[in-house]
Amino acid sequence: MTRCPWCLDDELYMEYHDEVWGTPLHDDKMLFEFLVLEGAQAGLSWITILKRREEYRKAFEDYDIEKIASWGEADIERLLGNSGIIRNRRKIESAINNARATCLVQKEFGSLDNFLWSFVDYKPIQNHFTKMEELPASNTISESMSKELKKRGFSFVGPTICYAFMQATGMVNDHLTDCFRYHELI
């Protein structure tokens, strides 16, 4: 079975590749989870975050968006003491801030899903890359998404983070054309 080469060094990576990466997500809690995780990943490797994913779910109470939006300084301090997540104050504050911004988006658009998927006209973009070197770090869509998210008060949502988010949540199919998942997601 041929897979994208980026996942071959680790069993957890392969499982993520085979079951999650590139699969279209339309659940607000899961989309929010990936916004938090992609923001936490800034400056780090994805495997670092992936290994902490379950602890993030516990620490962020299974991504209860409204609950997280109500958190304050005591919650930030609690999270800063949690060795199972990335203990970076700015990233933790960003997750809480992004929950608040998500609540506003949900009120305006009905769901985070409606808002985010509008950037790709509600259907995944099917790329046709044959080599890892062809995959972009960002594109015009992730730049537009980043600009709009920032305008709405989100943070840790630069164009590169938004593109990684789009890959993770299936807004783009960036599996290489010889990868078994590429054909499953067409």
Image (cartoon, rainbow, N blue to C red):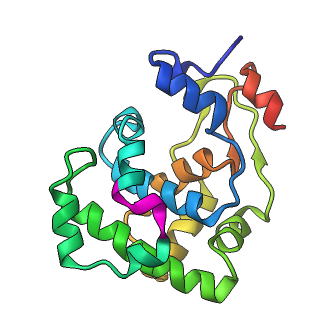
Question: Which residue lies most toward the top here?
Answer: 1
> Magenta segment: does it hold 76?
no
Classify residue 1 as left or right of residue 151. Answer: right
Residue 31, image quadrant: bottom right
Q: Nearer the viewer, residue 15 or 125?
A: 15
> What's the magenta bit mostly, secondary-structure-wise?
helix
Up the image or down, 67 lies above or below 2; here it is below
**Quadrant (top left, top right, bottom left, bottom right) of the C terminus:** top right
Residue at (79, 65) in percent of width and height: 121
**Which residue shows up at 61% across the image and 88% down it?**
107
Q: Which quadrant does the N terminus fall into? A: top right
Report the magenta residues as a range: 59-64
On the rendered structure, is 50 left or right of 132? left
- The x, y position of residue 108, in whole percent, is 64, 88
Q: Is residue 177 visible?
A: no
Task: Residue 105: give x, y in percent of width and height.
Answer: 58, 82
Residue under the image location 37 percent in, 41 percent down: 49
Locate residue 15: give its quadrant: top right
Q: Position of residue 127 (x, y in %)?
A: 74, 39
Residue 17 position within the rendered picture, expressed as x and y whole percent measured from the top left: 60, 30
**Residue 140's image quarter?**
bottom right
Residue 108 seen in this snapshot = yes
Residue 101 left/right relative to 90 = right
Question: Residue at point 23% right, 65% down?
Answer: 90
Q: How many marks?
A: 0
